[in-house]
Structures are given as C-alpha cells and as structure tokens.
Amino acid sequence: MSASLLRRGLELLEARGRGKAPPGPQAGSGGPRTRRRKAAKGPGRSKATIKGRVVKSAIEEYHKKKAVSHLRENLQYMTSGRCVADKAVTQQILTQNRGRKSKDRPPEKKAKKKPEGTVFTEEDFRKFEREYFGTL
C-alpha cells in the first residue's frame, strides 16, 4: 500500500467516527528531520566533569596488566600421564606437515655400514704364518 492510500483510508475512518484529524505531522511522531540528543549514560552523568571518578592506583594497574608466566602450569599439563603416540604415527604426522619442496625435506639418512670383522683370530694368523712360511 502506498502512503496516499493509507492517508485516504484514515481520512475516511476519521470522517465516519469522530471528526476530522488535524492536518500535518503530529507532535512527537519523530519525523525524518527531528533530531534527538543522546542521553548521558547513568543518572545525570557528564563526561566533562571529574566528580565521581575513582582514582586508580598506577601500581595496581601495572600488576593487572603485567604478563603472568604460565610455564609451570603448561609444563605440568604437558608432562602429566597422557597417552603417547607411537613413533611411526608421529613420523607420519611430521612428514605430512613438512613442505613438499626439496629444501623443506631433511636429507635421507643412509644406513651406516658396520666395519666387517674378521672371522679369523690372531692365533689363527700366527698358525697360518708358521705353516706357510715356516717361521717360529
């Protein structure tokens, strides 16, 4: 419905019922050009005055904002008896989270070769030397 249709309908209702409605906007309707002042927060409070303001101690404010170390609590939480994942699972997680570029991958560890020990003992070598070369 348009505003003009509403006005006509209201005029018809007023004509039938009580009488004619006064023309123009009614008082206190809050038209588009009326402005309101913002009410001060609190009972009669004005920001410009210092009356009623509580003086805060600088030391108390410092202690409130001072960084608190949670290291001990965090260590307690981390070292408490929680289930530990298998080494294979942790390795899989680490490889998945690692980047795909070659610079992000650590060098692959090569299996170290153990020095091959001899089957013969020192006594066997002396015995062979005596038999082969004939020295005592």
Image (cartoon, grey):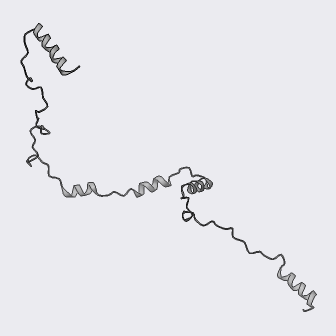
Position in image of residue 36 (x %, y %): 11, 35
- 42 or 8: nearer the eye? 8
Q: Is residue 85 left or right of residue 20?
A: right
Q: For residue 117, which quarter of the picture?
A: bottom right
Q: Foreground: 103 or 107?
A: 103
Residue at image position (69%, 70%) is 112
Picture coordinates of residue 79 (x, y %)?
A: 50, 55
x then y, percent, for residue 122: 83, 82
Locate the N terminus and report the quarter of the image it occupies. Answer: top left
Could you tell whether 121 is left or right of 26 in the image? Answer: right
At 56% from the left and 56% from the top, the residue drawn is 94
Residue at (87% x, 86% y) in the render: 126
Q: Position of residue 42 (x, y in %)?
A: 13, 38
Front position in the image: 33 or 8: 8
Most distant residue in the top direction: 16
Q: How many marks?
A: 0
* Residue 2 horizontal side relative to residue 131, left or right: left
Indicate the quadrant containing the C terminus: top left, top right, bottom left or bottom right.
Answer: bottom right
Instruction: Looking at this view, name the residue that lies furthest to the bottom.
Output: 135
Residue displayed at 18% across by 21% down: 3
44 or 109: nearer the eye?
109
